[in-house]
Amino acid sequence: DYESGDPRRGGDENRFYYKNNPPYQAKNRKFDSLSELLMIEEMRDDIFKAISSYITIFGDSKINVKAASKEVISALLSEEVQDREKKAEEIITKRTETGLTAKNFLTNISKSLNYAKPEELFIKELIKDQSKYISDQSTKFTVKATGTSGKISRTIIAVFDRGKDMNSEVITLYRRIF
């Protein structure tokens, strides 16, 4: 409820946040940076470190199945799938086939890997409403670049939005140099 303003446990949504030092309130609006996730009650440093390379605060909250990493694809697989890492690698190889879209991804990948139906391969939440969770395109991209001169090194991380139209102006959403 830090971002949404929707207290799930009833009562004051700020109860946890007021106990911190210094105390703060739930933001109740979109995140400005990924590190803000650390201000959420349930978020721990170890979880944040484990997932931060695979998530973003930008975008439409969908997974681009044509660009998702092996780790993200693996997380979409049913618990019953044997050797999920290897299966994710197979999916990454198969997803380059022409004609694969968000609408036909679950069915076509399942068939190409010899599963009778998507429910045997993917998690139930994904099957119920795939249009809510997956996409086959991205408009936002993260770029990380490091330059070194002698003993001095600088890294920049930036997030760009190219818009839905390929002719749109590219907008910088976030930039940090460290």
Image (tube, helix red, strand yellow):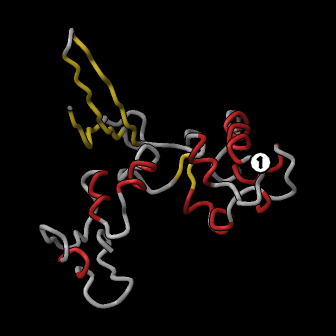
In this rendering, would 138 be left or right of 40?
right
Q: Quadrant of the N terminus?
A: bottom left
Check the image and report above or below for 96 versus 75. above
Above or below, 32 relative to 25: above
Residue annotated with mark 1: 108
In the image, residue 149 sits, relative to residue 74, either above or below, namely above
The residue shown at (39%, 42%) is 140
Amino acid type at circle 1 is Asn
**For the view shown, which residue lies furthest in the left direction?**
22
Counting from the top left corner in percent of width and height, residue 178 is at 20, 32
Q: Residue at x 63, y 67 (%)?
A: 125
Residue at the far bottom in the pictured view: 11
Image quadrant where residue 36 sits: bottom left
Q: Is 130 on the left or on the right of 142, as rendered?
A: right
From the viewer's side, name the closer residue of 55 and 45. Answer: 45
Q: Position of residue 59 (x, y in %)?
A: 40, 51
Residue at x 29% of width, y 77% of height? 5
Residue 57: give x, y in percent of width and height. Answer: 35, 53
Asked which secondary structure carries label 1, the reply is: helix
Please identify the quarter of the rendering in which residue 153 is found. top left
